[in-house]
């Protein structure tokens, strides 16, 4: 076994470590940018939802000055005329979602299995 | 497969029984009946919800004079240009950044895995809610201008009243919405690359950028192309983003899908609306054919 010159080895190790540290720091910076990118519209939704008067987002405030769950209460207890069937509509969403899922999986897996066995793709 | 192999594969019982005549080269009679029974629901759905509406649409928009009216109108030409820009820039931006981002998610740290869950939020949220949030963020008194004023002391423009800004807003919103999905698909593609290929590249001294260019890109090329085609087909038919973010403002960011709906409901000219969308059909069919051909290639694949 040949012995590598000690200085070469340590310097390459150090370079490796330094590159690793730069890459980790880059990952953290990227993560912060990505979190802002993903969550900014979500934050704006929250700002609108927590606002009592329905206009925080248009008065120049960038955080909820007087946050309230009044809007959520209104939804859950069906307080407004256009929300009076909220739980019924909620059930409709679930029903449609589950039926779509079940039917899609059933119909396409049957057809996919049959077409696979018939081997249409390989020139019959 | 030779016929001997076929008999062996079918099991010993077929050897003793006299072979019944079959209508299909690979399946004996009974199985063919089952196969047809399995395909019937799918075919019924296809006919009822794809072929019939398409045929009805073509019949509705069959008069050549409709297309003459369309091609002569400025709004249609604007919509074609906007659609080309929207789809062309949107698909490539979304896919390219998704490819880069999938590399970020290959990192082994635990917090990166947690980030993957957060990244799915834009994709998992209802599209309408997200796009309405974008719209309200971008209006003149909206959140974005408030942030700009608070942090930098400048007041931004009315983002949705200038053609390029409004088109850009649509593109940003669409990228925000679709990129997580493509990132996940390309991440799955990257994870399917065998580890020994990375090790071989490592021994050859290829790291970072060179590994990406010479290993990841060639291996993911086919998947990337399939995603591009699929994304283009979806984006041509995209109505939600443009309708809710820019709403067609300032008069010319309408794409074909929103223009069709406008003709239908606002102008009361359903034939013209259907014709506007049907005019994009040749492009969609071509993309579909390309997509199916790509899915069948067996060259470099994962």
Image (spheres, rainbow, N blue to C red):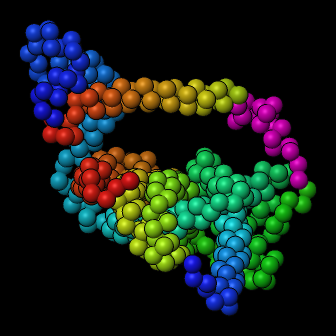
Q: Residue at x 17, y 27 (%)?
A: B6
Say which residue appears at 34% left-offset and 46% top-offset.
B270
Q: In this rendering, does residue B117 appear at all?
A: yes
| Residue B290 image point, x, y percent | 26, 55
| Residue at image point 33% right, 29% down | A113
Q: Is residue B295 above or below residue A27?
A: above
Looking at this rendering, what residue extends furthest in the top direction? B17
B120 to B87, vertically: above or below = above
Q: Is residue B256 visible?
A: no
In the rendered structure, the answer to whether residue B284 lies left or right of residue B202 reads left
* Image coordinates for residue A22, horizontal then vertical, percent: 69, 79
Residue at point 26% right, 22% down? B35
Residue A23, by quadrant, is bottom right
Q: Which residues are magenta?
A: A67-86
Q: Is residue A84 left or right of residue B215?
A: right
Q: How many marks?
A: 0
Quadrant housing residue B34? top left
Whether residue A85 is in magenta: the answer is: yes
B190 relative position to B79: left or right: right
**In the orientation shown, which residue stands out farthest toward the right?**
A66
Q: Position of residue B112 (x, y in %)?
A: 68, 59
- Residue B223 highlighted magenta (yes or no): no
Closer to the camera, A2 or B102?
A: A2
x, y (%) of residue B167? 50, 70
Vertical order, B12 against B114 (above or below): above
Seen from the viewer's position, the closer of residues B78 and B53 is B53
Q: Is residue B279 above or below residue A91?
A: below
Query: From the image, which quarter does the N terminus of chain B lie in?
Result: top left
């Amino acid at each position: 076994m040949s012995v590598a010159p000690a200085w070469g080895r340590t310097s390459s190790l150090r370079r490796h470590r330094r590159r690793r540290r730069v890459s980790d720091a880059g990952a953290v910076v990227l993560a912060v940018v990505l979190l802002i990118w993903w969550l900014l519209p979500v934050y704006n939704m929250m700002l609108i939802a927590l606002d009592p008067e329905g206009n925080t987002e248009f008065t120049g405030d960038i955080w909820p000055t007087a946050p309230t769950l009044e809007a959520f209460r209104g939804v859950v207890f069906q307080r407004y005329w256009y929300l009076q069937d909220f739980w019924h509509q909620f059930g409709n969403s679930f029903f449609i979602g589950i039926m779509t899922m079940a039917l899609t999986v059933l119909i396409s897996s049957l057809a996919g299995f049959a077409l696979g066995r018939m081997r249409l793709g390989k020139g019959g | 497969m030779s016929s001997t192999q076929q008999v062996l594969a079918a099991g010993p019982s077929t050897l003793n029984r006299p072979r019944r005549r079959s209508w299909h080269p690979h399946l004996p009679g009974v199985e063919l009946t089952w196969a047809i029974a399995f395909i019937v629901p799918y075919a019924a759905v296809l006919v009822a919800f794809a072929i019939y509406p398409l045929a009805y649409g073509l019949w509705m928009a069959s008069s050549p004079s409709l297309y003459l009216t369309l091609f002569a109108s400025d709004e249609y030409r604007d919509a074609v240009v906007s659609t080309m820009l929207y789809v062309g820039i949107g698909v490539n931006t979304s896919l390219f950044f998704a490819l880069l981002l999938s590399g970020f998610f290959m990192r082994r740290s635990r917090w990166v895995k947690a980030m993957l869950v957060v990244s799915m939020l834009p994709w998992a949220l209802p599209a309408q809610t997200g796009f309405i949030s974008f719209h309200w963020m971008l209006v003149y008194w909206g959140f974005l201008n408030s942030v700009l004023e608070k942090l930098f002391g400048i007041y931004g423009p009315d983002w949705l009243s200038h053609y390029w800004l409004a088109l850009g807003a649509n593109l940003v919103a669409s990228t925000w919405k679709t990129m997580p999905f493509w990132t996940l698909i390309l991440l799955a593609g990257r994870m399917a690359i065998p580890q020994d290929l990375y090790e071989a590249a490592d021994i050859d001294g290829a790291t970072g950028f060179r590994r990406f260019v010479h290993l990841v890109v060639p291996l993911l090329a086919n998947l990337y192309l399939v995603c591009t085609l699929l994304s283009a087909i979806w984006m041509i038919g995209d109505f939600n983003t443009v309708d809710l973010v820019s709403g067609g403002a300032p008069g010319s960011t309408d794409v074909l899908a929103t223009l069709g709906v406008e003709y239908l409901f606002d102008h009361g000219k359903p034939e013209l609306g259907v014709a506007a969308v049907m005019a994009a059909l040749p492009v969609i069919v071509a993309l579909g054919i390309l997509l199916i051909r790509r899915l069948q290639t067996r060259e470099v694949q994962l």
